[in-house]
Image (spheres, rainbow, N blue to C red):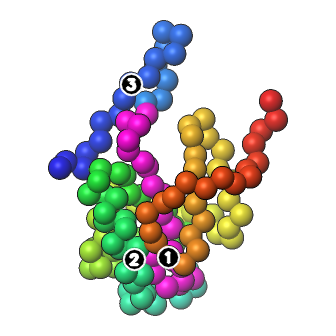
Amino acid sequence: MSNKVDLEEKIVDGQYISPVLPENVKNYLIDIDGTICDDIPNEEPERMATAGLYPDALETLNKWYVEGHIITFFTSRVEEHRDVTEKWLNENGFKYHGLLMGKPRGGNYHWIDNHLVRATRFDGKFTDLIEKKVTIQVFEK
């Protein structure tokens, strides 16, 4: 199976708008520290090369990759940590499409986008996702 995903063109009122993924493909943005491995702060980069792997994260993310989903790591690690991060990901066998550095630190993220965004808080174990009803904040109409 090819892991290249073709975006679908969208036309609204005769004008092209941003393309979208096919409905069956998810675009996962995955944190690194404390999510797929030990939580290593930027202030201790010497620990990044030997961070302890969370095996369930490796298994689940590689499964999603093989299923055709997009896997992009989105980390608060800074650009100067890219080489050690890529080496660690590759040595540990992660399959992924991209690595975005420099995510703002501190949590309490609110992502505002014109595309559908679903957020899932990691709470200690990677598994397939399940449906659950929750309360969210939205813009007033």
Cα separation between marks 3 and 2: 35 Å
Say what amino acid the circle numbered 2 marks. Answer: Asp
Which badge, 1 or 2, is on the more N-terminal residue?
Answer: 2
In the image, residue 33 above or below residue 25 = below
> In terms of depth relative to the viewer, which is nearer, 3 or 100?
3
Cα separation between marks 1 and 2: 7 Å
- The residue identified by callout 2 is 56
Say what amino acid the circle numbered 3 marks. Answer: Glu
Residue 124 position within the rendered picture, expressed as x and y whole percent measured from the top left: 54, 78
Residue that appears at 50% across and 76% down: 125
> In terms of depth relative to the viewer, which is nearer, 2 or 78?
2
Q: Nearer the viewer, mark 3 or mark 2?
A: 2
Cβ–Cβ below 8 Å for labels 3 and 1?
A: no
Which mark is on residue 125? 1
User: Is 24 left, or right, of 125 in this rendering?
Assistant: left
Cβ–Cβ below 8 Å for labels 1 and 2?
A: yes
Residue that appears at 76% across and 48% down: 137
Q: Secondary structure at mark 3?
A: strand
Residue that appears at 58% across and 74% down: 123
Residue 64 position within the rendered picture, expressed as x and y whole percent measured from the top left: 34, 59
Residue 68 position within the rendered picture, expressed as x and y whole percent measured from the top left: 29, 50
- The residue furthest top is 14
- The residue furthest right is 140
Which badge, 3 or 2, is on the more N-terminal residue?
Answer: 3
- The residue identified by callout 3 is 9
Which quarter of the rendered picture does the C terminus lie within? Answer: top right
Say what amino acid the circle numbered 1 marks. Answer: Lys
Q: Secondary structure at mark 2?
A: helix
First to last magenta residue range: 20-41
